[in-house]
Amino acid sequence: MHPQTVPDAIFHTRVRNDALGGPNPFEWKKLSTQDVFRGKRIVLFGVPGAFTPACSDDHLPGFEAHAEAFRALGVDQVVCLSVNDAFVMHQWALSRNIEKVMMLPDGNAEFTRKMGMLVERTSNGMGLRSWRYSMLVDDARIEKLFIEPDFKDNPSGVPLDVSSAERMLSHLQGL
């Protein structure tokens, strides 16, 4: 069973602070669920892992490509969530030239677990990861949730169909 509102969680992020200087001018910043979702209309998509083929080649670039279309339909922010740490999420965004999608690390899998989206990927040496999904959230209330079929531990792969940027865009256009 999935919640009707986004669960309370803490996200451990890194933010730029030029006053620090040097090659790594970033410092830790904790964001709460309320910081991310309160008073905002958010499209969030959860992925199994940074740098994985479907996530890197299709899922993330699809949402980046449609970010302006989402904004035109009243979405304040497009968010990519993965059970990876802030360092990995940052490097993944750099590697794919991501500028419009917020990269949200769920390194402790707290949000993913509370969403009911945590699955084992131990057969691939990936530990615990997010199932692939997308959702439309308005002021912390989940309006629409698209979950890929065959949710289970240790799948041979995770499909990318119902949680795509195009599916979410179509849903928003139909509202």
Image (spheres, grey):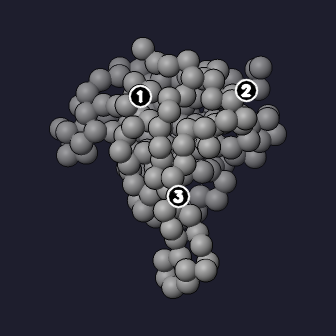
Mark 2: secondary structure: helix
Locate the N terminus by quadrant: top left
Instruction: Examine the rendering and report whether any part of residue 2 can be seen.
Output: yes
Instruction: Examine the rendering and report whether any part of residue 167 can be seen.
Output: no
Mark 1: secondary structure: helix
Residue 103 x %, y % = 54, 52
Q: In the rendered structure, which disc, 2 or 1, sits on the residue that comes first in sequence? A: 1
Could you tell me how far apart the alpha carbons at marks 3 and 1 are, in whole angstroms?
Answer: 21 Å
Which of pointers 3 and 1 indicates the residue nearer the eye? Answer: 3
Label for residue 114?
Answer: 1
Q: Quadrant of residue 124?
A: top left
Residue 34 x %, y % = 60, 38
Which of pointers 2 and 1 indicates the residue nearer the eye? Answer: 1
Could you tell me how far apart the alpha carbons at marks 2 and 1 are, in whole angstroms?
Answer: 25 Å
Q: Which residue is mark 3?
A: 29
- In the figure, 56 relative to 23: above or below? above
Label for residue 172?
Answer: 2
Residue 127 x %, y % = 24, 42
Mark 3: secondary structure: strand
Label for residue 30?
Answer: none
**Residue plotted at (55% across, 38% down):** 33
Say whether marks 3 and 1 touch (CB < 8 Å).
no
Locate the C terminus by quadrant: top right
- In the figure, 83 relative to 40: above or below? below
- Residue 146 appears left or right of 68: left
Could you tell me how far apart the alpha carbons at marks 2 and 3 are, in whole angstroms?
Answer: 31 Å
Give the amino acid at mark 1: Lys
